[in-house]
Image (cartoon, rainbow, N blue to C red):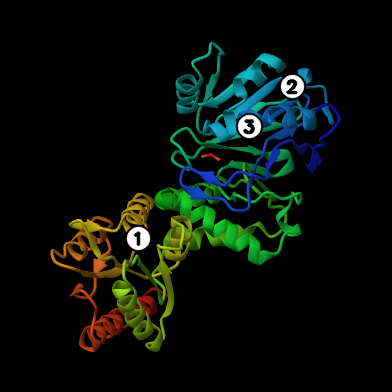
Amino acid sequence: MKDVYSAIKVTDNVYWVGAIDWTIRDFHGYTTPHGSTYNAYLVMADDITLIDTVKAPFKDEMLSRIRSVVDPSKIKYIISNHSEMDHSGCLSEVIDFIKPEKVFASTVGVKTLKELFHDTHEITPVKDGETLSLGNMELTFMETRMIHWPDSMFTYLAKDELLFSQDAFGMHLASLERFADEIPASTLEYEGATYYANIVLPYSPVVLKTLDKVAASGMKIKVIAPDHGPVWRKDIGWIIDLYKKWASQKPTAKAVVVYATMWHSTEKMAGAISEALAQAGVKVKLLSMNETHRSEVIYEVLDAGALIVGSPTLNNNILPQMADVMTYLKGLKPANKIGAAFGSYGWSGESVKHLEAMLKEMKVEIAAESIAVKNVPDDDVLRKCHEMGKAIAAELLKRATVAN
Ligand code: FEO
């Protein structure tokens, strides 16, 4: 693969030497219809340094991009900011090939890399705030535990005012454009929010603390270089403000109604609830799990104030599509939501009870009495569903006003 791929200059001293994965469609349950990139960066200091590597099958693409700038054997240091395999899958092989003088990772990163690869490479731990001289410039490390794994850290290059942010500020978007300012803002916002909702959301309290820590550090940041998607080099405040908004999860006047249906009874109920919410002035997303992927649901839940869920009873339980999405949502820990449950049944009717219990486990505040209907809802039941929508809308509009 020699001479096929090129590095892309990011700043005076930094090149992007990552890989583009046009075909990946699944990241541990998160569907990625637009592929992704695994970003690695080369710092052309006196002591040449590689920041992160790429997923194992993309090693040769990365090495080819490195070769377009420098002979890989000249690399003195490798920094592993995050040990998840999309950034470290080829690390062991790359160490064998490049033979750097030293490889650095956070204290937890050192242990995690050992547990992942069981190799004999020596990796040097770096602490929060520690610096590494590269001769004519310096790197500073900042631990960012749980964004995205316990090992995660940022690396800051003061000379170029550049923050290597590993998973943070990333998105799963394969493109030949390397910079965010080359991509429409609507695409960036959608892909960034989908990535945040599906990957970063459970760690939102840590995100807020980390943003404060970065602000308090006095680091001047002109460029943010994440491990996925485009590099931010213009108006970086735009993506930082979006992270603050997504992490704070203030309730908005938006409701997500998620349901699955067997013979359209639960679907009719969902329709009546949604109509009442919309009539009251609430923005509504009505999502049938017979047709929708779980990744899209959490994207919609991210900026919603209400989550209303419905399922018919199947074998004393809920439909498997609803079990899937409820498990996924619970793990991602959306906060500050109100909600309710509804559904139809033939004889035993446990689904609504199960859904309500799941909402409570997710700390969703139940804002209306659940509705279970035997077989097909008649006009009276649909009116009750309409009343449920009205009640939730009233509460939601009150909370959204207070929050904003
Ligand atoms: Fe892109 Fe948490 O790995």
Q: SS for tag 2? A: loop
Looking at mark 1, is its residue's CB closer than 8 Å to ligand 1? Answer: no
Mark 3 Cα within 10 Å, few/some/many (few <14, many 20+)? many
Q: Quadrant of residue 46?
A: top right
Residue lying at 56% horizontally and 43% vertically, measured from the top left? 167
* Placement of 53 over or under 330, stated as above or below: above
- Does the residue at mark 3 contact the one at mark 1 (Cβ under 8 Å)? no
- Inspect the image, locate mark 2, and give the three-letter code of the amino acid beneath it: Ile
Q: Nearer the viewer, residue 366 or 123?
A: 366
Residue lying at 64% horizontally and 43% vertically, measured from the top left? 163
Residue corresponding to mark 3: 52
Q: Is residue 44 visible?
A: no
- Inspect the image, locate mark 3, and give the three-letter code of the amino acid beneath it: Asp
Residue corresponding to mark 2: 75
Q: SS for tag 3? A: loop
Q: Which mark is residue 6?
A: none
Q: Quadrant of residue 57?
A: top right
Residue lying at 37% horizontally and 56% vertically, measured from the top left? 325
Q: Is residue 354 left or right of residue 9?
A: left
Q: Nearer the viewer, residue 313 or 192?
A: 313
Coordinates of residue 59 in the picture (x, y in percent): 68, 28
Q: Nearer the viewer, residue 376 or 131?
A: 376
Q: SS for tag 1? A: loop
Q: How many marks?
A: 3
Residue lying at 51% horizontally and 44% vertically, measured from the top left? 27
